[in-house]
Amino acid sequence: MTYEQSPWSLTDLFPSLDSAALDSGFKQLENCVAEFEKFREDLKPEISAEHFMTILREAEEITRVVYRLYGFAGLSFSADTQNQAAQGLQSRVQQFGAELQNRMLFFDLWWKYLDETNASRLLDASGDFRYYLEALRLFKLHTLSEAEEKIINIKNVTGINALTTLYDSITNRYTFKLEVNGETREMTRGELMSYARHSDPDLRASAYRELYRVYSESGPILGQMYQTSVRDWRNENISLRKYANPISARNLGNDIPDDVVDTLHDLGHKNAGVFQRFFKVKARLLGMERLRRCDIYAPVSKSDKTYAFDDAAKMVLDSFNQFDPKFGALAKRVFDENHLDSEVRKGKRGGAFCWTVGPDLTPWVLVNYQGQADDAATLAHELGHAIHAMLAEHHSIFTQQACLPLAETASTFGEMMLIDRLMAQESDPALRRDMLFRQIDDSYATIMRQAYFAMFEKQAHEMIQNNASVDELNSAYMENLKDQFGDSVELSDEFKWEWVSIPHIYHTPFYVYAYAFGQLLVLSLYQQFKAEGESFKPRYIRILEMGAAESPEKILQKAGIDIHSAAFWQGGFDVINGLVDQLEKL
Ligand SMILES: [Zn+2]
């Protein structure tokens, strides 16, 4: 069979955007929630474990339907961000979701404040829900009254959520112009940025110039949107919820102790030299005095080898199969059920993601496949996410999806398996060297780049609290880049706008350190896999199968990893250091 690029099918969720089934979905929810509200009377400390579980199962069922509606709206919007029906449905679901959340809030609040003795009695009977319930209680100190929580939920719909949707709508409709072979072409950001890895240095420079020309035109407005979102974060998390600092709110959500995140950031800073050394090797091999920022993803060999989608799909599936036939079969389910949108289309969301709707549905995957080795790696990455979710599909909807720091485990591991496979297939030393470079390029992009984004976010949150202007944020961003690159890379002025082009810092403040966490973790796991072979696999699969049924700390403890240990994280950097050593000898 031949795999072809196509949009996905969402009919496993709903037949269409104008389907009557959507209205029934909303009605069904309305009824379920009305039933759920009757449980309010029953919430006494001495409630029987049996009745407590009935309430939880009802909440699970409601969440299942909500996730379907959210999924359908969000996926439809991603497939066509300019589609007004999709936009409309998304707003409707968000509004409805917030109202439901408010009506059900009493349960979470009651649970958070329940006395220890009764909480532990109910936890013992809660089976797979246990960690979900434990994690809720972590937020006890940062939870407000029911009335206050309700107001925040309602105001978020038309406040911060609307702001980030606007950011998406504005930036997703950007088009970019680039002259390629004497012909000026109009393209999406994804298409434009594929030239960041082009062998022609002028094209690379023009692509970045064009990217930031477009972003800088609305830079002050995008910057203002960011300032607003940061203020919103502070008002809620520091002023109202009393977190010690802005990042702590994310850390608690991730259930990662603050000290672990600090260790990660310190090590990122300490190891900046590893990547600086890499950029110098790269400059030497490219015959350049010094790399410009637009050259850091330049291919070292002159090859712009591309892979037909069918070949890429088969390579990815094969590499999963080789690791474990179960992995291959799960990835294939995404193709077989037509849950993959692989085309490049105008209006379609850029980049790539995997969206898990719930344990009873195969996840949906979006990529913008354009034929480069990198695109094949992205496909492996997103399918890795899907496999992770499917390995954990025996859990409840509350405990299936790994929390952020572990969310990148199977994806990055999948990507590394694909690269190993490509390496094994290539006999040409130049291409092999290119792949080695690509691997470190990727480590740079997921570890160092993200660690420095996170450092910038921390700084920006402080600066905005002190009324910093967009220009001042631009300058701080340039300083951040200088610290990151040292004397190894030349920076041109337009890069001061890079931060306004990073959707993550708008959507999910402090998300990005999870990438560094995940990648370093996987580098270390991958080393273990190579050293141990078969005996490693059950331990790794166990991590994935746990989903979110335990804290990341405990899940990793079971695999013999202590996340508080600086030496463990340094181990990940040492792997990269070793790769750079190899390159220096070439
Ligand atoms: Zn990912």
Image: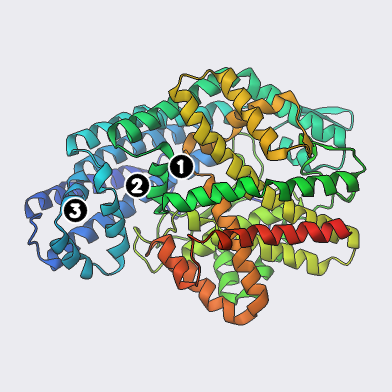
- Tell me: 337 left or right of 204: left
Q: How many labels does the image show?
A: 3
Image location (x, y in percent) of residue 22: 35, 44
Which residue type carries mark 2? Ala
The residue that disc 1 covers is 74
Against 553, residue 157 (above or below) is above
Which residue type carries mark 3? Trp
Q: Is mark 3 on a helix, strand or loop?
A: helix
Image location (x, y in percent) of residue 100: 25, 42
Q: Mark 1 vs mark 2: which is more N-terminal?
A: 2
Q: Nearer the viewer, mark 3 or mark 2?
A: 3
Q: As rendered, which of 351 and 407 lies closer to the eye?
A: 407
The residue that disc 3 covers is 111
Q: Is mark 2 on a helix, strand or loop?
A: helix
The residue that disc 2 covers is 21
- Tell me: 126 left or right of 560: left
Q: As rendered, which of 456 and 269 lies closer to the eye?
A: 269
Label 1 vs label 3: CA separation? Answer: 30 Å
The reply to whether residue 449 is visible in this rendering is yes
Which residue type carries mark 1? Gly
Mark 1 Cα-neighbour bin, 10 Å: few <14, some 14–19, many ≥20: many
